[in-house]
Image (cartoon, rainbow, N blue to C red):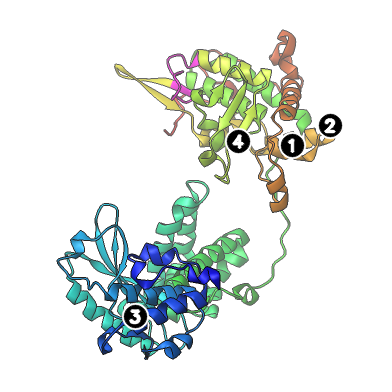
Amino acid sequence: MTGRRRLPSVGDLRTAADVDALPDDPVALKMLLVEAVSRGSGVETYLVYGDQWLRNAADVSALPDDPAMLKMLLMEAVNRGRRLTNSGLGRLEPGRHYVGDGTGLFVDVSEKRKVSFGQRLRIAGTGKRIELGLGSWPAFRLEEVKTKAVTHQRMARHGKNPLLVRAEVPTVAEAVEEFFKEFGPSWVGRNTERAYRASLAKYVLPRLGARRVDQVRRSDLAAAVKPAWVEYRRVGRDLLRVLRGTFRWVRAHDFRNDLPTDGVEDLLPRIEREERHHEAMSHEDVAEAVARARMFENHVRRVTPSDGMLALAFEMTILTGLRRQELVGIRWGDIDGSKRVLTIDAHRMKKKTKAHMVPLSSAAMDVLRRARELGSGTDSEGDRVFAYAEHIGDRVAIRPISPYSLSRFLQRLGLNGTLHGFRSALDDWATEKGTDAQIVERALGHAVKSKVRRAYSRTDLLERRRALMEAWGEHATRACQGGADVRRFPGPSLPLQEPHQSVLGVPRKMTRVSS
């Protein structure tokens, strides 16, 4: 009780910030409201809540114990003593100022003195609270906005949501576009949104694109997704993921109150498919891949620097266990030569949540040395590591290698598997050597799946990973150690041809790259 007596009086409250600073104690807030009501004189000073007038302590005591609602009413009471005028809006201090006319109308003033109108309402019957914008000053005058606020308040008293009434319900195509605009930038990978759009354009939008979102049923969504679900299960799951996000956006903006995506999978056929993985080369054959890449580089680097740099990037991919998108974006400024550490920024990682530090083995440092020699003139801090100089007339253009050309490089070497499969080879090799699984996961840049484990695991195990990557580098380059001639490496041999031809008999040409 003593604590409540320390609350300021209504006369001490000047702004919305003062009211917001009050403790969320419904009893204390009601005491202040009783004081505000008792100080008024005349009907025009009464506060309005829903359909009832607050004229005395009994009316205030009957209010729900909702601190947010009580503070809103208290702010209106505070503003009764100083009526806002249209000419006085430009002199208001930054913050939120309630007009105090019983409609929940307020004025927001930014730090740059931009004045905008808004209104807070409670929808009768549902108890839902909404906040809507009513324009900015001086484009809209206070008197005009007050008229709108009264209309909205009448609608709310009759259980109607002004947001739904005044806004046109969008179509599925329009809602998808708004969802992409709001959440697309946060997705992983540049091609994710492009793939989602292509799937929607093929399966969903021709059937449902022109239909209003409040008219879409669960069966409609199931019928649209079913062809992709049956033919390409992954595409079907991606479609459901996008549609769930879209209709959550629809519900959040009050265009409908339910989620028609709930239970859609129950209407789709159950299809069991064999789990597929990236085709991977055995870790026993990795040394051959590195040897072939080294031979390729030695043969073409003076003739076609682009292919020589491609071979170096391929070897670096194996030695570091990085994904191709992460590797091609490496800049010289990302490498700490003294500590032999490469840092991949969080925004270039797959999950985009945390930077990844890669300890560089002796073999990886040797690749960087050769890349610096081959790409001389492109070794400033902001330049890409794996880039080459292309002569175009009288000028020289610096071209980084592309992820696509890096993926095709295995076929150019006559090897099976995928580039991503070398990460699996590293995992298998480390597991057979008895390496702790947590160290292997950190070396591959995988996020810790358990939330509890993430909370307690604060170390990146850099030094233990350094030992692992050093051993992996020795394993991967064992056919190239001691000055061994890689052309004598056992297995299908690669023909060494004249410099004017490319290895594997492919006609020499400039590799297309993307910036």
Above or below, 280 against 33 in this view is above
Choose mark 1 or mark 4, whichever is in front. Answer: 4
Q: CA distance from mark 2 to mark 4?
A: 24 Å
Principal secondary structure, stretch drawn in magenta: loop
**Type of residue at label 3?**
Pro
Callout 3–callout 2 Cβ contact below 8 Å: no
Q: Which is in the foreground here, disc 2 or disc 4?
A: 4
The residue to which callout 4 is attached is: 356
Residue beneath disc 3: 162
Q: Amino acid at mark 2?
A: Lys
Q: Which mark is residue 433?
A: 2
Position of residue 212 measured from the top left corner of the image (x, y, whole percent): 39, 77
- C-beta proximity under 8 Å, tags 2 and 1: no
The kind of residue on which mark 1 rests is Val
Q: Where's the N terminus, which quadrant?
A: bottom right
User: Is residue 343 visible in the rendered structure shown here?
Assistant: yes
Local secondary structure at mark 2 = loop
Label 2 vs 4, first from the N-terminus: 4
Residue 362, quarter of picture: top right
Q: Residue furthest left?
A: 87
Is disc 2 surrounded by few (<14), some (14 to 19) or many (20+) residues within 10 Å? few
Q: Nearer the viewer, residue 150 or 389?
A: 150
Mark 1–mark 3 CB contact (< 8 Å) = no
Q: Is residue 174 left or right of residue 445?
A: left
Q: Which residues are magenta?
A: 374-388
In this rendered view, identify the residue nearer to me: 279 or 239. Answer: 239
Which residue bears the numbered disc 1? 440
Mark whose residue sits in front, 3 or 2: 3
Which amino acid lies under the numbered mark 4 shown in the image of this protein?
His
What's the CA distance linking mark 1 and mark 3? 56 Å
